[in-house]
Image: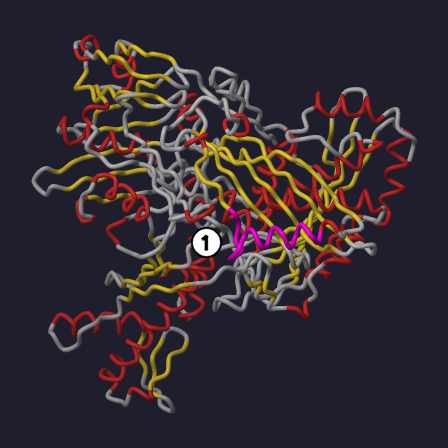
């Protein structure tokens, strides 16, 4: 990586990997508990049906069965569906249908759990589950969001008339007046670029599927849930709200997590059923999803149809942007499911561009499909895709080179801080140099020669640009806890969960360097709701900026307390105490005492009642949004006779603020690119007209492989530190996904002659590309 920034990039290997590559990781399936039983869920084969009868008699009589749970056993629970308040047009709130742990009256998607069989072994539970007899009365389902909003569509929920979950009018204080003003701008525009694009439905497909082990201590009246999550505390808080119990009665523990990407943020029906069962049957219960089961039960993602219009003047200046989204919520409202196409999508606008007038509105529809919820980017890739496809169309209709058109409309550095038309404020950014750097690394000016060379070989070659800006941070509140166990180490306890991002690799050096102590003296801990550290999940590229800010604050507060104790021990005034390189000292003397010795003395003084606080320190901070940005350039080559396409080169220049660890930044970029390429090239969830999942395994649902990655990835950093947090970081975890899908799709559109690829939707499979090439072959040669 060509790293050019004002920050530092700590070197050294990832500290997490040694244990993991040796096979000593502790995932959710690696920690059996005494007297453990196993659960198997009986799931609906229907997309929409009333439940007439559930008979568990035969299952209860099966060998090894401990018990069977049905919807009647979970009816006292509150709805699993949780969503921040969101009001639509006229102040009407988001419709929130009741989501049960186990369906009792009706099922609304294939795979919805109806019963849970608990047995002495996983095989016994699975065998008995096949004996549960359920009588269904099928209803007519609807799976497409636009069809669900049609007048004659089947009604999923009576409280959501016309299947409309929310009609969100955008950020404007007076949406109707804003719409009229923008209509007038469009009416007078020289050019109007119009596109209609689909961000297809996707499966998250994390390497480790979901799983959990629930137990109940009757003497303490305490539930314990060990689950793979993105934040033990936020999962605990969701679950106690559903169970209507005090938070002290549930402890959630998370150890190693094999990938999450938004999937493992909120609660799921299985977790509630496991806890109810653990109490009822007086045994711990373990459940681990298989891959086929994951396709039927995990939250899915994307599924947003967008129509966008971009108004330009005669010189190609952007005047106004209008976007209409139709989002598929699924059968229930998933974790921030409605916020994704509304708030998360909207806050990415207007990207890097100076567009002073924006009209965005969103209709969210219920369908008989799995709920949609966060997946890497969660609204950001969708927004950037729509924005950049619209800009590419604007370049086509104006005849202006795509790079020149983008450069002409970039927000200048002199405008920072920049207040956007949707109400956000970009605190920092220098976009033109990033575009120039990306174009230079990509050899943009020399592309014509490469295209001509490819044409001689009978291939179509195209290049696509994606100027990306996203918001990072989401929920601002996050905490950190520093503790001294008394063994000569300092524990950094965090609420955010590392699910592969390398939190220990990033945060341990940060603490060690600020304190001037060896890194092996710092221990990283996470994944325990009992720590009671404030905050949200590790989502939205928020961990480094929010947990990092709290860590810096905790260090400062701890050192202030340490100076007070050191002053007592060294018999000096507190104002005469300085801290450097792991020691407190009296200024101008050789009297000093080490940090860990001060911590020990503080613990002793507190124990004896001489001070009220030792050096253990818990803090909370609120960190505003940041705005990571970058420019990505994809170059593709297509065989028009087969439709086969290769991404032959890829360039990424990003501004993630101050990089805390260059290796982690580069790894995040490569992983995010793989997921972006997966969406652009091959991944898509399909339901048939009966609501049956067609893509229910990796035989049907294509996943990117190493051979799908470009051999030539050129990446660099041109970073402008954020001004809204003490570390100057902006986040990087989603940038590759957010930028890449538009870069690839714009390259495909550029490659196929005659504009025949401009209207292709993702994924651009070989069959779709081949058909477009056949249309393009009749176009005039370039």
Magenta range: 169-185
At x 36% / y 69%, what residue is drawn?
A: 555
Extreme-left residue of the structure: 219
Residue for point 20% across, 42% down:
244
Q: Position of residue 352 (x, y in %)?
A: 66, 56
Q: Is residue 305 above or below residue 568?
A: above
> Within the image, what quadrant is residue 323 found in?
top right
Placement of 629 over or under 614, stated as above or below: above
Q: Secondary structure at mark 1?
A: loop
Q: Nearer the viewer, residue 597 or 701?
A: 701
Q: Is residue 267 left or right of residue 425?
A: left
Closer-to-camera residue (262/173): 173
Q: Which quarter of the rendering shows the C terminus?
A: top right
Lateral position of residue 79 relative to residue 621, left or right? left
Q: Counting other residues with Cα less than 10 Å from the Cα at mark 1, is it few (<14), some (14-19), or many (20 or more)? A: some
Which residue matches tag 1?
474
The answer to whether residue 667 is seen in the rendering is no
* 86 vs 63, nearest the viewer: 86
Q: What secondary structure do most residues of the magenta stretch adopt? A: helix
Residue at x 38%, y 28% (from the top left corner): 157
Q: Quadrant of residue 571?
A: bottom left
């Amino acid at each position: 990586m060509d790293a050019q920034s004002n920050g530092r990039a700590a070197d050294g290997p990832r500290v997490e990997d040694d244990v993991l590559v040796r096979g000593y990781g502790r995932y959710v399936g690696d920690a059996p508990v005494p007297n453990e039983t196993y659960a198997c869920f009986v799931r609906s084969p229907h997309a929409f049906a009333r439940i007439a009868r559930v008979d568990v008699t035969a299952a209860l009589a099966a060998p090894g069965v401990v018990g069977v749970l049905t919807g009647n056993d979970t009816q006292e629970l509150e709805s699993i569906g949780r969503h921040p308040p969101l009001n639509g047009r006229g102040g009407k709130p988001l419709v929130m249908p009741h989501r049960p742990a186990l369906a009792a009256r009706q099922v609304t998607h294939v795979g919805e759990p109806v019963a849970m069989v608990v047995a002495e072994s996983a095989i016994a539970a699975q065998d008995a589950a096949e004996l549960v007899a359920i009588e269904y009365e099928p209803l007519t389902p609807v799976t497409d969001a636009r069809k669900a909003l049609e007048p004659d569509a089947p009604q999923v929920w009576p409280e959501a008339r016309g299947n409309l979950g929310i009609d969100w009018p955008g950020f404007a204080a007076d949406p109707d007046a804003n719409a009229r003003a923008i209509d007038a701008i469009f009416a007078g525009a020289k050019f109007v670029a119009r596109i209609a694009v689909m961000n297809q439905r996707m499966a998250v497909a994390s390497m480790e599927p979901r799983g959990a082990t629930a137990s109940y201590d009757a003497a303490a009246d305490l539930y314990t849930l060990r689950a793979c999550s993105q934040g033990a505390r936020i999962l605990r808080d969701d679950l106690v709200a559903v169970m209507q119990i005090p938070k002290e009665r549930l402890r959630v523990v998370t150890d190693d997590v094999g990938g999450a990407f938004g999937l493992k943020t909120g609660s799921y029906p299985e977790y509630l059923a496991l806890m109810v069962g653990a109490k009822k049957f007086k045994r711990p219960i373990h459940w681990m999803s298989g891959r086929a089961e994951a396709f039927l039960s995990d939250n899915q993602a994307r599924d947003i149809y967008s129509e966008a219009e971009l108004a330009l003047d005669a010189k190609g200046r952007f005047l106004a942007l209008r976007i209409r989204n139709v989002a598929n919520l699924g059968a229930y409202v998933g974790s921030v499911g409605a916020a994704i196409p509304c708030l998360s999508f909207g806050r990415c606008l207007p990207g890097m561009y100076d567009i002073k007038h924006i009209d965005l509105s969103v209709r969210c529809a219920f369908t008989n499909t799995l709920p949609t919820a966060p997946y890497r980017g969660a609204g950001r890739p969708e927004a950037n895709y729509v924005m950049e496809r619209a800009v590419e169309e604007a370049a086509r209709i104006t005849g202006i080179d795509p790079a020149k058109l983008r450069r002409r409309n970039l927000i200048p550095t002199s405008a920072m801080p920049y207040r956007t038309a949707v109400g956000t404020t970009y605190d920092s950014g220098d976009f033109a140099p990033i575009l120039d750097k990306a174009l230079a690394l990509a050899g943009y000016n020399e592309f014509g020669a490469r295209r001509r060379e490819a044409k001689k070989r009978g291939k179509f070659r195209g290049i696509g640009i994606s100027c990306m800006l996203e918001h990072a941070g989401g929920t601002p509140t996050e905490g950190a806890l520093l503790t001294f166990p008394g063994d000569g180490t300092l524990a950094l306890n965090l609420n955010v969960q590392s699910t592969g991002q390398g939190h220990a690799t990033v945060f341990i050096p940060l603490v060690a360097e600020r304190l001037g102590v060896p890194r092996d003296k710092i221990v990283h801990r996470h994944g325990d709701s009992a720590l009671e550290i404030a905050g949200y999940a590790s989502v939205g590229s928020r961990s480094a900026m929010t947990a990092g800010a709290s860590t810096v604050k905790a260090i400062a507060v701890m050192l202030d307390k340490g100076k007070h104790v050191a002053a007592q021990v060294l018999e000096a005034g507190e104002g005469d105490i300085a801290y450097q390189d792991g020691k407190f000292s009296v200024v101008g003397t050789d009297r000093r005492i080490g940090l860990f010795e001060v911590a020990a003395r503080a613990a002793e003084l507190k124990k004896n009642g001489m001070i009220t606080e030792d050096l253990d320190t818990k803090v909370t901070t609120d960190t505003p949004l940041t705005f990571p940005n970058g420019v990505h350039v994809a170059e593709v080559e297509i065989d028009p006779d087969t439709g086969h396409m290769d991404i032959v080169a890829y360039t990424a220049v990003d501004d993630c603020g101050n990089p805390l660890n260059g290796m982690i930044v580069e790894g995040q970029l490569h992983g995010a690119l793989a997921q972006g390429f997966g969406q652009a090239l091959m991944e898509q969830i399909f339901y048939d007209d009966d609501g049956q999942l067609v893509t229910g395994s990796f035989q049907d649902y294509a996943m990117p492989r190493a051979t799908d990655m470009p051999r030539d990835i050129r990446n660099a950093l041109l970073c402008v530190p954020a001004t809204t947090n003490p570390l100057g970081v902006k986040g990087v975890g989603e940038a590759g996904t957010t930028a890449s899908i538009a870069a690839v799709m714009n390259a495909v559109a550029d490659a196929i002659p005659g504009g025949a690829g401009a209207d292709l939707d993702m994924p651009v499979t070989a069959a779709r590309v081949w058909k477009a090439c056949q249309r393009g072959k009749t176009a005039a040669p370039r």
